[in-house]
Amino acid sequence: MGLAGAEMIGWPRLSYKTMTKRILLLPAAVWTLLFTVFPFVYTLWISTQRIRLGRPGYFVGMENFAKAFADYKLSESALGTILFIAVAVPLELILGFAFALLFNRDFRGQGVLRAIMTMPLFATPVGVAYLFTTILYEEGGLVNSLLAPLGWHPPWLSNPFWARLSVLLVDVWQWTPFCFLVFLAGLQGLPQEVLEAASLDVVKNRQIVTQVVLPMMAPLIRLVLLLRFIEAAKVFDTPFVLTSGGPGRSTEVYSLYTFRVGLRFFDLGYAAALSLLLLVAVMIVANLLFRGTREMYD
Amino acid sequence: MQSHKRLTLLVWVVLATLAMAVSVHAASDLVPIKNLSGDTVYVPKSDLGTIITDGKKPFAGKTITITVNVAGPKGPIEGPLHEWRKPWEELTGGKVNIVGIPYAEHYSKAMTDLLTGTGQYDIFMAGADWYGDLIAGNYIIPIDKYLNDPRFPKWDRSAMPLSQVALHTWQGHWYGVLNDSDGQVLYYRRDILTNASYRQRFKAKYGYDLPVPPKTWEQVRDIAEFFNGWDWNGDGEPDSGMVMHLKVGGQGMFHYASLSAPFVLFPGPTVDRYHNVYWFDPENMNPLINSPGHVRALELLLQLAKFGPSAQLSWDLGEAWDYFMRGKAVLTFSWGDVGGLVQEPGRSVIKGKLGTAMLPGTLEVWDREHNRWVKFDSPNVVGNTTGGSWHGVISALSKNPEVAYHFLAFLAMTPISQWHAYRGWDGVDPGTRHHFLAPQGDAKLEDYVAQGWNAEDVREYTQAYYETFFAERQLPYLRIPGGHEYWVSLDQHISEALTGAVSAKEALDRTARDWDEITNRLGRREQLELYRQSIGYGKPYQEAMGGK
């Protein structure tokens, strides 16, 4: 006769306590299986198929993946996305950090300003993109009306370079507050005695920032970089609403191209392959960043 | 004598009574149907179908769900569904659930429902360009068996032009029910093009009289160039020659298709390899999109784009139309919506100044058979049904196909269909003889004017559409699987050319390469078979167009 709460039941023979734990974990496990593992496995399976509307699909093995490497549209979209990440993410981090430094001191109206600063964070990306469609409207939109007296009339959405810039600006506007908020929390969590000691040793504020604050904040910066990288790699809403990927294909980012292939042209097998390729690419980079962060903490 | 008089009087009384009875009977034969806007149309009882007129409500407890491009109860295409839903429900006992879906999502949502076998929707207010995918997958049902069934409302197929019949049928079978009729026409400022001073200056510059309306695309080019970049409307700002909607996803490629048709479509008595074909070579499915006719047409489009606001490269329909209605451009070419919207005083400043004409032609046409340009004595003019011609088709997964058809047929009855055309704002554009004025049709000018149209505007407008839809030669409609993908590719590459990233030739070469890839992926043999079916390959031209 075992102790209460530890009697053996079922097969394989498990303790009552273990059984209870497993039963309590079951909903989470089912949830994960249903909404994470199953879609992933299903996507893997779909990526090996040729699916055509109204006609029987068939197995094509790795053909969809091979096709991806010969697809000039994919190359252009991937290149555009890399460019977007390379510019938007550093810009958001730099601006976010600069604003955090600015707000990391007492001044009047700080609370109100901080609230205003973080507002873009709570808007839906699609809504923001629609908002900027009107702001950047070339014939009498807000920005061009303000620039008109200067004789300047940027073709925000009708020129490939400016359209890319517009998508970038919207993203920076929306996500800089996120970086700002995290960095501000980080700065306010720094040990004050270290900073005070540094201010006695070092003359210039810039040196305190570069030689003391930045190294202490490095793990947090890497973490924000990781999060923003993952999000930026999946950017979709802004170009979808603001430019529809145009003019031409200048703002057709990777996710938008994948979306079109899958849900516009119903080439679901190829779209699944593209999704998996993006997943792999993001995971590799994220892993490298994460490993670096972990080493820092260690 | 007295008795004779009495007899005569009695005869007159009897005759008068009979006449009154006949007129009362005739009046009672018309059923009043009041819509959401409060307008009443009168429908002959015999046209309503026995399901309604026998007083029963056989659809009680049945609900049909219909998808449509979202626009709200007063918006285009969706609006009319709301207008007539309640009266139909009262007459039949059925219920209609209207699901508005954004234009960009509509096709995907519908196809997802069909592909997965969900069967959530009974009716799709589909674009005619969906047919290739819908037919290939057997996703919609033919409606032939309902057409002459006395139980259902009557609508007049014989009044439709062959060009529209072709969009609602496949291989001789009807699938779609008449609703909207899309096609592009040329809109111009009548007051500006007839201005004596401007005409004098135009002649001095170009050496010929300013044609009203222009008959060739070259003339359109000259007019657009002449009027671009100076203040011809007196508002103190420079104005434009031409405005278009050229945003990727903004249906700019339809501009190109309408414009290029006369350059490419070489006339002939049959639909064969070299005559009356536009999209693909019907022998091998090779794209024709980068042939010299197409290239020249795109070069012209690029020139026209320079004679308008640079922002139009990022403009959707509404923005381009708005620019024209604000009196900022002298020309545009687009769908029938423009004619109706121009009549709205709050939105337009050009009511009463709108000229409309069938799209121009060209005097030189590319002959693929002999690889040369052929000069014509008179312009090669081609009608078009470019656009969605949004109309109802019934899902093969519908559990209530009869209810679905009944509702669609109800909307297509002549008095209701005419009301849509008269109304103007509802996106249901004119396309049958019942929408055109005498002598071509039986619509009444006073009915258009009563709905706010300017008489001269509507005369030209309906005439232009009559000529467009009943034109002897028509731009073939792309109705094969992957149609949407072919269009998107063309759209993107035209946009690349418009931004100057590539030349017209390079843009169309890229399009051709994409099209080949799409064709190969979907199966060249199957695609060729469906393409041939869709254009009536090998048939005499009129027969291929749906005529007998």
Image: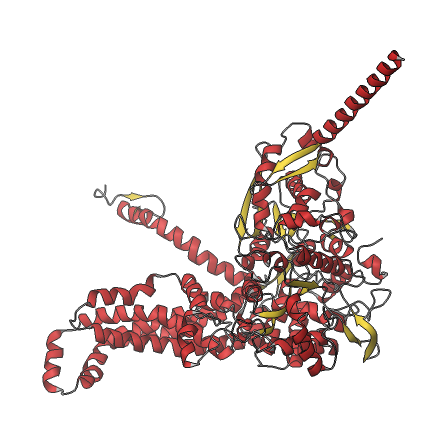
- What is the x, y in percent for residue B280? 74, 69
Residue drawn at (42%, 68%) of the image: A135
Name the residue at the front extreme: B1
Q: How many marks?
A: 0
Residue at 54%, 68% (x, y): give it: B315
Task: Please name the residue shown 20% across and 85% down the image.
Answer: A206
Q: Looking at the image, which is closer to me, A120 or B463?
A: B463
Lateral position of residue A25 relative to residue B515, left or right: left
Visual colour scheme? secondary structure
Image quadrant where residue B65 sits: top right
Residue B326: x %, y % from top left: 55, 65
Q: Position of residue B533 (x, y in %)?
A: 77, 59
Compared to residue A289, the image places residue B445 above or below, namely above
Q: Nearer the viewer, residue A68 or B459?
A: B459
Left or right of A145: which side holds B517?
Answer: right
Closest to the observer, B438 or A53: B438
In the displayed image of the protein, which residue is found farthest to the bottom?
A: A203
Can the viewer see residue B486? Answer: no
Position of the N terminus of chain B, as image quadrant, is top right
Using the image as rendered, state which of residue B521 and residue A8 is in the foreground. B521
| Res. B34 image quadrant | top right
- Left or right, A78 with reference to B18: left
**Residue A127 in the image: above or below residue B266:** above
The image quadrant of residue B469 is bottom right
Q: Is residue B406 visible?
A: yes
Residue A219 rendering spot, x and y as whole percentages: 26, 75
